C-alpha cells in the first residue's frame, strides 16, 4: 500500500557509528600519524571493509535481488576506485612514501583504464536496459528512508571536501569518506533485508 516514500527518523546503528566517526574525524586528523591517511593505510582499509560488507549485504538481499546485484556492482566500482584499480596495491615507487606509478608509466597500464571504463559502462547499461529504476522505486517505497543515514552520507562528503581543500589533511578526508561509506552500507542493509512493508528493524 505504500504509494509514497516514507521517512524514518530513528537512529540506526550504522548512523550512530557514522555520527561518532564524523565528530572524531577532525581531532583524529589532527593527532593521528599522517601515515594513517596514506593509500593502503588503516583508514582506507576500514573503508574497503565497509564497502565489502555492503557487497555481502547486497548478495544476501531478501528482495529485488537483481537490483541489489546492480548495487553490488556499484560498490565494486567504489572499491576499485579506492585502490585505483590495483595501481596503489601493486605499483608503489621503490624507496618513495605514498607514491605510485601512473598508469601511463606502467606497461599496458592503459588496459586497466579501458577495462574499468567498460565495467562502468556495463553497470550503467545493466541498470538502464534491465529497467532497474523501476525496482529502485519499489525498494524506496517498501522501506522508509533512513534520514540520518542519508544526512550523514552528505555530512561525510562535506567534511571530506573541507579536509582536502581547506585543511589539506588526508586523514580527515579519509575519515570523512569512512563516515559516508558506513552510513551508506547501513542504509543498504536496511533496504536489502526488508521482505514486505516498511522495515522497522534497526541496523
Image (cartoon, rainbow, N blue to C red):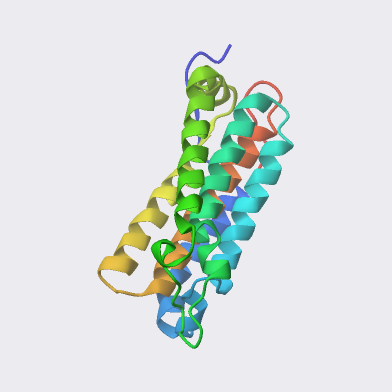
Total residue callouts: 0
- Residue furthest to the bottom: 95
- Compared across the picture, whether 10 is left or right of 121 comes to right
Q: Residue at x 51, y 78 (%)?
A: 36
Q: Residue at x 47, y 17 (%)?
A: 4
Can you say whether 192 is above or below 165 in the image? above
Residue 59 visible, this angle: yes
* The C terminus lies in quadrant: top right
Q: Residue at x 49, y 46 (%)?
A: 116
Image coords of residue 64 (percent x, y)? 65, 24
User: Residue 128: x and y, percent?
Assistant: 48, 22
Residue 118 spot, x, y in % from top left = 49, 38
**Front-most of residues 178 and 68:** 68
Horizontal relation, residue 196 to residue 94: left or right: right
Above or below for 203 versus 144: below
The quadrant holding residue 200 is top right
Res 169 → quadrant: bottom left
Residue 187 lies, in percent from the top left, at 57, 41
From this viewpoint, is residue 19 visible?
A: no
Quadrant of the rendered structure where residue 66 is?
Answer: top right
Position of the N terminus by quadrant: top right
Q: Residue at x 46, y 84 (%)?
A: 97
Amino acid at each position: 500500500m505504500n504509494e509514497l516514500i516514507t521517512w524514518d527518523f530513528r537512529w540506526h546503528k550504522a548512523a550512530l557509528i557514522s555520527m561518532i566517526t564524523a565528530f572524531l574525524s577532525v581531532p583524529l586528523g589532527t593527532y593521528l600519524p599522517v601515515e594513517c591517511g596514506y593509500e593502503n593505510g588503516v583508514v582506507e582499509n576500514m573503508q574497503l571493509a565497509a564497502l565489502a560488507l555492503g557487497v555481502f549485504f547486497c548478495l544476501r538481499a531478501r528482495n529485488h535481488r537483481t537490483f541489489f546485484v546492480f548495487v553490488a556492482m556499484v560498490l565494486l566500482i567504489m572499491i576499485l576506485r579506492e585502490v585505483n584499480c590495483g595501481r596503489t596495491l601493486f605499483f608503489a615507487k621503490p624507496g618513495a612514501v605514498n607514491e605510485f606509478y601512473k598508469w601511463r608509466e606502467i606497461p599496458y597500464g592503459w588496459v586497466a583504464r579501458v577495462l574499468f571504463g567498460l565495467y562502468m559502462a556495463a553497470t550503467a547499461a545493466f541498470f538502464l536496459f534491465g529497467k532497474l529504476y523501476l525496482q529502485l522505486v519499489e525498494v524506496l517505497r517498501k522501506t522508509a528512508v533512513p534520514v540520518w543515514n542519508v544526512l550523514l552520507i552528505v555530512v561525510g562528503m562535506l567534511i571530506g571536501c573541507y579536509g582536502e581543500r581547506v585543511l589539506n589533511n588526508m586523514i580527515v578526508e579519509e575519515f570523512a569518506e569512512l563516515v559516508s561509506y558506513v552510513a551508506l552500507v547501513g542504509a543498504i542493509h536496511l533496504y536489502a533485508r526488508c521482505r514486505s512493508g516498511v522495515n522497522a528493524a534497526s541496523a
